[in-house]
Amino acid sequence: MPRRGRSWSGSSILDDTDREKVQAKRRAHSRLGFAVQLTTVRLLGRFMPGPRQVSAEVAEYLAEQRGITDTGVVLAEYGERDGTACSHVGEIQQDGGWRDFAEVRDELVG
């Protein structure tokens, strides 16, 4: 796992509920992309603007947990269909109680 900054070790482990959500995705690239989105928002506190740009080490770690091989090729396919990554963000936000900063800005500033 990456050693700089925060540790990925706890945030990139998928629990039983996570694994069910990931496994519900139809294709390998959707399963891996969803797992990347889910774990990076936990660590960073925000969604990555380009989830396909996650480090190879993190992608491989998540792929290994789901039995996905050829990680680079699979992750490169994530989000090619318009709206997939955005719908995953919406699902993760709803399930995890994540809110967009724009929605709560006034609460935080005021």
Image (tube, rainbow, N blue to C red):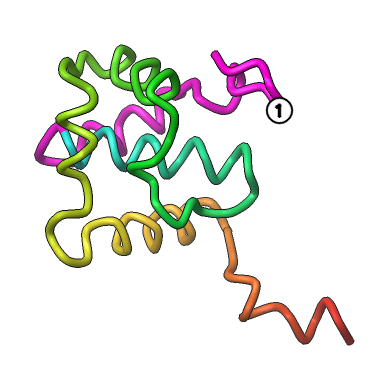
Element marked by disc 1: loop
Q: Residue at x 40, y 32 (%)?
A: 18
What is the magenta range? 1-28
> Is 89 contained in the magenta span?
no
> Is 12 contained in the magenta span?
yes
Q: Position of residue 45 (x, y in %)?
A: 64, 49
Q: Residue at x 52, y 39 (%)?
A: 40
Which of the 4 quarters of the picture holds residue 73?
top left
Q: Quadrant of the N terminus?
A: top right
> As displayed, is residue 45 above or below residue 32?
below
Q: Position of residue 84 (x, y in %)?
A: 22, 58
Give the crowd class for mark 1: few <14, some 14-19, many >=20 residues within 10 Å: few
| Residue 16 falls left or right of residue 44 | left
Relative depth, front residue between 12 and 25: 12
Q: Position of residue 58 (x, y in %)?
A: 44, 23
> As displayed, is residue 20 above or below residue 88?
above
Q: Position of residue 17 (x, y in %)?
A: 40, 31
Q: Quadrant of the C terminus?
A: bottom right
Q: Residue at x 40, y 23 (%)?
A: 16
Which of the 4 quarters of the picture holds residue 8?
top right
Relative depth, front residue between 32 and 94: 32
Q: Residue at x 20, y 39 (%)?
A: 76
Q: Which residue is mark 1?
A: 6
Q: Amino acid at mark 1?
A: Arg
